[in-house]
Image (spheres, helix red, strand yellow):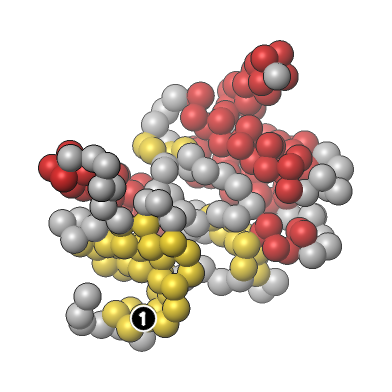
Amino acid sequence: MTGPWVGAEMLHQGAEAIVHAGTWMGRQAILKQRQPRTWRHPDLDARLTKSRMSAEVRLLRRLHLAGCPVPELLSVDVSEGWIITSRMPGGPLFDHLRSGGDAGMLEELGSIIREIHAVGISHGDLTTHNILWDDQGGLSIIDFGLSQITDDLEPMGLDLQVLNECLKASHPSIEGGIDRVVSGYLSNGGKGVVDRFNDIRSRVRYHG
């Protein structure tokens, strides 16, 4: 890539994309370059990449306009498979909680998740790796590559279930973590989603 992007470091290399930190027109930014899936037919892979990136662009714009604490879209080239967003402050909530940090923000996290759901978006991978914590800036949500625009309660309930499983597996010392999240979620409405989450949770327990 040429132009106003200046790369600094690679943050993550996954199956779907490589993520770099850097600057865009002098602003702290993140570049996500989608990787070709070589096991798929090239035409199909290109169509799927274009579809997913177009959806990510639409939902990021929607979330930013709604005032949600998410990255701002700065530039995109769907044909080349890259997207540049602002870099949110802080580090993963995972690290903050694992190092003994206060879990008092979990109610606020629930309220933010509700804000995202209220504009018709499910995250798709809501773990403490995709939630950032900054001592000054507070909470933000990142990585919307698996997100979708939807009014279906199921994927929204699954967001809460994924976070529930993450809190239990990665942060077992936090008592009642998901209950704090749900309390914050309900302070902003959303009883239908919480009811669906409880249904999913009971299904998982039954089949587990």
Give the residue number, with chain letter if any, for mark 1. 7
| Near-viewer residue (6 or 119) | 6
Residue 4 locus on image (x, y percent): 25, 82
| Near-viewer residue (189 or 35) | 35
Residue 96: quadrant of the picture: bottom right
Q: Can residue 180 be seen in this view?
A: no
Residue 73: quadrant of the picture: bottom left
* Numbered disc 1: secondary structure: strand
Q: Residue at x 73, y 55 (%)?
A: 105
Q: In which quarter of the image is the N terminus?
A: bottom left
Q: Residue at x 15, y 56 (%)?
A: 79
**Outermost front residue:** 39
Residue 35 locus on image (x, y percent): 30, 56
Q: Is residue 108 above or below residue 152?
A: below
Q: Is residue 113 visible?
A: yes
Mark 1: amino acid: Gly
| Near-viewer residue (10 or 166) | 10
Q: Residue at x 68, y 37 (%)?
A: 165
**Outermost bottom residue:** 26
Q: In which quarter of the image is the C terminus?
A: top right
Residue 75: quadrant of the picture: bottom left
In the image: residue 101, left or right of residue 123:
right
In the image: residue 70, left or right of residue 103:
left
Q: Which residue is drawn at 70% across and 71% down?
A: 135
In the image: residue 28, left or right of residue 33:
right
